[in-house]
Image (cartoon, grey):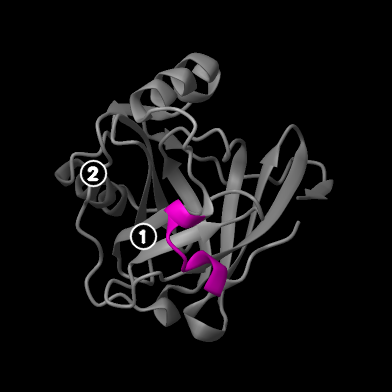
Amino acid sequence: MECVSGDDLKQPLSSRAALTSLPAMSASLVLLLLLPPLVSAQTFGWGPCKTPEVQANFTLEEFAGSWYLVEKLPAFFAPGKCIRSNLTLMENDTVHVTSSHFFFDREWRFEGVLVTPDGDEPAKLAAHFFKFAPSMPDWVLATDYTDYSVVYSCMDFFHAFHLEYAWIFSRSPSLSPETLRHCEEILDREGIETSRLQEVEQDCTDVPKKSFSY
């Protein structure tokens, strides 16, 4: 898989990917009609994306390292169990991401980058995992760096509707019930739906050691 550079990602999203052949509302309706399985597997909402508060005084240096995903909103691109990410800080505030998950008795691995498009708001990261796909916002809503992090993303379709994602990560394979509840309350406070949060199993000792990278 070929990744783009951090400088490429700092360009405005509209300059990298734009749908100009259809009016905004018509394009939104076409997407809804053509992608019902995709939409049903996500958290859908009408109108533009939310703009939740993010972690104050965020630092990439402390955020880097290994994270285990313990709960998530449905996302077609993150199936399976034992979803883990390792973040390595590179030059120019770029983070190299190596993620893995087990799905259909096989370990799948992929790589990407995180950048900070706006240095004044370092917690509002942008993620890119495929060369010709637009970047996705990865906003760190809260983290204590040593135990948990709450990350939010949203794809806005012409302010007509949106698909949103949320992830609760841990530095270990599990979080205490109190910490997990605290993370869910952060999402609730920002109006992000928590009723659809799914637990991510982190025990993969019985899975055959076959791997595939993409």
What amino acid is at disc 2? Lys
| Camera-side residue of 8 and 51 | 8
Q: Secondary structure at mark 1?
A: strand
The image quadrant where one finds the N terminus is bottom right
Residue at mark 2 to residue at mark 1: CA–CA distance: 19 Å
User: Is 130 a magenta residue?
Assistant: no
Instruction: Say if 44 sits above or below 199 in the image.
Output: above
The dominant secondary structure in magenta is helix
Q: Residue at x 58, y 55 (%)?
A: 84
Q: Residue at x 73, y 47 (%)?
A: 108
- Left or right of 46: which side holds 113? right
| Camera-side residue of 92 and 192 | 92
Q: Which mark is residue 149?
A: 1
Q: Residue at x 41, y 71 (%)?
A: 116
What amino acid is at disc 1? Ser
Magenta residues span 7-15
- Left or right of 104: which side holds 41? left
Q: Secondary structure at mark 2?
A: loop
Q: Which mark is residue 50?
A: 2
Residue 11 x, y percent position in the rendering: 47, 65
